[in-house]
Amino acid sequence: MSTPLQTSGSISLGNIRDYIGEGGRMNLSGITTPYSANQIFNSAVNTTTPSSNLLRLNDLYGKTFGIYSAYSRRFLYGKRFVNPFDGYFRGYFGLGTPSSGTSGMLYTQNKGFPIFLSLTTGSYFNWRYLSIQGRIRGVWYDIGPPFGYSQTTWDVTGEYEEIQLEVLRIGLSIQIMLEAYPMADERTRGSGVHNMDITLEIFEEDSSSGLIR
């Protein structure tokens, strides 16, 4: 499940840097390098320009980085996802609020905001039968481990706006723990992690009866 910024009390720039994984200096507002907090959470669609340059720290209550269940970024995934039918998962990274992750920083394409992904499965054998792809500025790339990889955890970083996982073998059930971290400075894992336990499987059809088992 996602980890939103706090919803009460005081919020400091240090809290925001910790959340997004920015180890250096950053501004609350303005068009800056590195990106300001206002740019990260409130940019207009497909831009890094906020609709307003006025931002108070209290306006950041509940701001969220997470994996959303649809292109519109209206609903965040919860802790668990199970697909025993076609063995497929697709997630959409977003920044904004739990019900509207539409900051232009990641919507509809990533504008230069690194995301650290950690995937863990029960056996390294599973990597052979799991497709892992990330979408970067509208183009899908294979981002899974190389053939012969013999560890059960695979880490990868990139400027993704979407991720998809797909089981490639009928009848095989694969469990994956997916952790997605904002990593604005490309070095620091932010505290705004989204954790998911994902189970994927493709129905196996009984060829003699035509039934699914």
Image (spheres, rainbow, N blue to C red):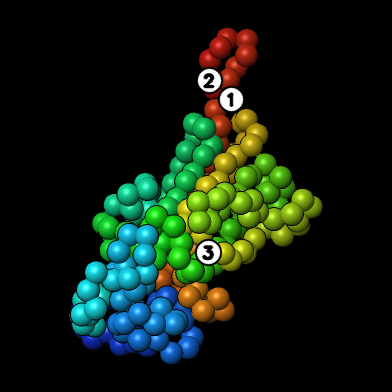
Q: Which disc is residue 159 wearing?
A: 3
Above/below status of 173 relative to 108? above
Which residue of the protein is positioned furthest toward the top in this rendering?
209
Q: How far apart are the two marked residues, 1 and 3, measured between alpha carbons?
A: 36 Å
Q: Secondary structure at mark 1?
A: loop
Q: Residues within 10 Å of mark 3 (few under 14, many from 20)?
A: many
Out of 15 and 43, give the one closest to the viewer: 43
Amino acid marked by disc 2: Ile
Q: Earlier in the sequence, mark 2 or mark 1?
A: 1
Judged by depth in the image, the label closer to the viewer, 3 or 2, is 3
Amino acid marked by disc 1: Glu
Q: Which disc is residue 204 wearing?
A: 1
Q: Which disc is residue 212 wearing?
A: 2
Residue 104 in percent (x, y) is at: 36, 63
Residue 62 in percent (x, y) is at: 26, 70
Q: Are marks 2 and 1 in contact (CB under 8 Å)?
A: yes
Residue 170 in percent (x, y) is at: 62, 30
Out of 32 and 142, give the one closest to the viewer: 32
The residue drawn where x is 24% and y is 69% is 51
In the image: residue 158, left or right of residue 18: right
The residue drawn where x is 20% and y is 80% is 54
